[in-house]
C-alpha cells in the first residue's frame, strides 16, 4: 500500500477547507501537516480540525516555503491573483501541486506555471472539478462511444444564478477585473475547459459578446439606500442582502456563502458584516465592472461548433447541455442525461451517478472528491496520468479565455493560441 501522502494547505478559505475536508474522510490515504492562512480564525479552525502542530500553522506561505519540502504536496487555494508566486516556490522545492482554478490571470503567468512544474518534474492538478464528476464521466462515455455519431454542434449554458452573481461578482471578491479577473476567467474557465474535455480538443477560433447590463447605478430603484439595512425599498428587491443572508442564518446554513461574511454565526455578527462589510451594499451602488452575461461562440478543428452562454439572470441551477450529433442528440441538466437515437426514434435515460449538489457547499456534484482522489492517487503512485486536469490540458483551455475576451472587446473573431 502506498504511503500516506502529506499535504500543506496554502489558503484556508472555502476552497482550501473544502479540499482538506476530503482528507478527514480518508486518513489512511492523506494527512494535512501544515497550513498558511493570514486570517487567524480560518487558520486556527483548519489547524484544529487536522491536528496540525502550532508551529506549522502560519500566516504567510513564504514561512512554510522557507523550511524546505515539508510535505509531499501543496494545495494552493489563495486568491486568483496570488497563484503564481507560491506555485513557483513550491515546485522548485519538489512539491506536487493542486492549484485552484484559474491557474493564473494572464497568459504569461499560466505559461510560467506550466514551465515551472515541468522543469521541476512535479505533478500539477488544476481545480477543474467538472472533469471529475460522475455526471461528466457518464456524458463523456456517451460521446466517446459513438452513439451520437459525429458531434456537429453543442449548446452549453451556465446559469450562474441571480443571487450568486450578486454575492460573488457584484459585492464580492470577483467583482472587478483590476482586482481579480474577468468573469469568464473567474467563473467560466470551468466551462470552456469542460467543453474541451468532452469534445476531445480545444477550439481553434472564437467570437464573444457580453457586457455589464443590470448591476449599474442607472438601474437603482428610487428611494434605494447605499446599504440594504437602511433601504426603504429593500423588501421589494430580489437582491436584498438582509433577507438572503438573514434567511440562511435562520435556517442554520453555516456554509457558503454565509461563511464568507462571518466567522461567528450570530445575528449580531451578521448585522455587523452587513453594516460595515462589502456584502451589505446595494447591488446598484457597488464598484463592480465584470459582465453579468456573455456568449462565446467556438469552432473546433473537426468543424464542430459550440456556443457557451453565461448569465446571471437565472435561478440557482445546474449547467445545461445539448450535444447534437449525426446519429443522435444528448440532453443533460447536470443531474440526468437523455439520449435520442435518430435510427430507432427512441429516447433513453442514461444513469449519471449521484454526485450531490453542484455548488461549492455540495462538493460540486462529486467533483471536489474526484479531484482530490485523483491527485492523491497520482502523488502516492508517482503516476501523473491519473490527473485529468494536468498542466498542458489546463493551459490549452485557459488560452481560450483571453482569446474570447479579445473578441468581446474588439468585435473580432480570434484564433486560440496553443501551448508551445
Image: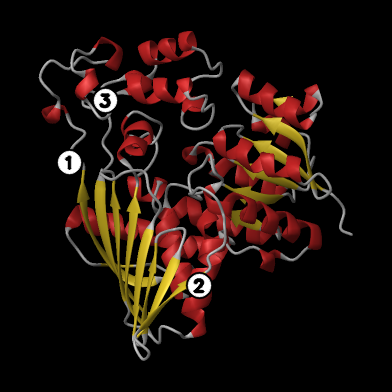
- At horizontal 51% and vertical 42% (from top left) the residue drawn is 360
Task: Identify the element where label 2 is drawn.
Answer: helix
- At horizontal 37% and vertical 82% (from top left) the residue drawn is 346
Quick one: label 3 or label 1, which is nearer the N terminus?
Answer: 1
The tag on residue 266 is none
Q: In which quadrant will I find the N terminus?
A: bottom right
Residue 297's spot in the image, x, y percent? Answer: 26, 66
- At horizontal 46% and vertical 31% (from top left) the residue drawn is 257
The residue singled out by tag 3 in the image is 286
* Separation (CA) of disc 3 from disc 1: 14 Å
Quadrant housing residue 56: top right
The residue singled out by tag 1 in the image is 213
Give neighbour class at mark 1: few <14, some 14-19, many 20+ (Cα, 10 Å): few
Q: Nearer the viewer, mark 2 or mark 1?
A: 2
The tag on residue 140 is 2
- Say whether residue 261 is visible: no
- At horizontal 76% and vertical 32% (from top left) the residue drawn is 50
Residue 84's spot in the image, x, y percent? Answer: 54, 44
Task: Identify the element where label 3 is drawn.
Answer: loop
Q: Are marks 3 and 1 in contact (CB under 8 Å)?
A: no
Question: Which is nearer the eye, 405 or 363?
Answer: 363
* Separation (CA) of disc 2 from disc 3: 41 Å
Question: Which is nearer the eye, 204 or 327?
Answer: 327
Amino acid at each position: 500500500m502506498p504511503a500516506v501522502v502529506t499535504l500543506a494547505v496554502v489558503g484556508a478559505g472555502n476552497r482550501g477547507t473544502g479540499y482538506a475536508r476530503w482528507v478527514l474522510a480518508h486518513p489512511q490515504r492523506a494527512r494535512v501537516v501544515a497550513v498558511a492562512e493570514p486570517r487567524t480564525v480560518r487558520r486556527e479552525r483548519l489547524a484544529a480540525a487536522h491536528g496540525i502542530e502550532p508551529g506549522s500553522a502560519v500566516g504567510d506561505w513564504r514561512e512554510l516555503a522557507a523550511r524546505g519540502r515539508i510535505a509531499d504536496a501543496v494545495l494552493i487555494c489563495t486568491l486568483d491573483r496570488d497563484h503564481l508566486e507560491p506555485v513557483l516556490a513550491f515546485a522548485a522545492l519538489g512539491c506536487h501541486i493542486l492549484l485552484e482554478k484559474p491557474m493564473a490571470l494572464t497568459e504569461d503567468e499560466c505559461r510560467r506555471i506550466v514551465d515551472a512544474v515541468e522543469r521541476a518534474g512535479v505533478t500539477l492538478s488544476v481545480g477543474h472539478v467538472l472533469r471529475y464528476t460522475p455526471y461528466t464521466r457518464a456524458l463523456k462515455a456517451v460521446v466517446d462511444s459513438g452513439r451520437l455519431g459525429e458531434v456537429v454542434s453543442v449548446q452549453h449554458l451556465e446559469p450562474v444564478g441571480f443571487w450568486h452573481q450578486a454575492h460573488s461578482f457584484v459585492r464580492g471578491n470577483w467583482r472587478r477585473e483590476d482586482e481579480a479577473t474577468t468573469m469568464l476567467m473567474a467563473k467560466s474557465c470551468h466551462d470552456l475547459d469542460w467543453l474541451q474535455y468532452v469534445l476531445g480538443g480545444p477550439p481553434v477560433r472564437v467570437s464573444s459578446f457580453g457586457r455589464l447590463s443590470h448591476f449599474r447605478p442607472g438601474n437603482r430603484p428610487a428611494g434605494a439606500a447605499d446599504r440594504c439595512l437602511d433601504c426603504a425599498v429593500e423588501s421589494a428587491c430580489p437582491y436584498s442582502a438582509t433577507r438572503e443572508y438573514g434567511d440562511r442564518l435562520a435556517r442554520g446554513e453555516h456554509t457558503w456563502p454565509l461563511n464568507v461574511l462571518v466567522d461567528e454565526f450570530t445575528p449580531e455578527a451578521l448585522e455587523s458584516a452587513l453594516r460595515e462589510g462589502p456584502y451589505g451594499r446595494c447591488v446598484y451602488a457597488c464598484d463592480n465592472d465584470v459582465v453579468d452575461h456573455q456568449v462565446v461562440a467556438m469552432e473546433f478543428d473537426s468543424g464542430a461548433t459550440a456556443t457557451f452562454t453565461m448569465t446571471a439572470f437565472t435561478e440557482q441551477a445546474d449547467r445545461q447541455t445539448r450535444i447534437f450529433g449525426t446519429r443522435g442528440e444528448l440532453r443533460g441538466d447536470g443531474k440526468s442525461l437523455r439520449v435520442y437515437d435518430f435510427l430507432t426514434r427512441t429516447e433513453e435515460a442514461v444513469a449519471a451517478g449521484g454526485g450531490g449538489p453542484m455548488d461549492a457547499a455540495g462538493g460540486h456534484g462529486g467533483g471536489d472528491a474526484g479531484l482530490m482522489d485523483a491527485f492523491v492517487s497520482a502523488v502516492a503512485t508517482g503516476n501523473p496520468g491519473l490527473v485529468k486536469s494536468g498542466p498542458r490540458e489546463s493551459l490549452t483551455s485557459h488560452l481560450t479565455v483571453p482569446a474570447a475576451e479579445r473578441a468581446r472587446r474588439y468585435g473580432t473573431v480570434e484564433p486560440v493560441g496553443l501551448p508551445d
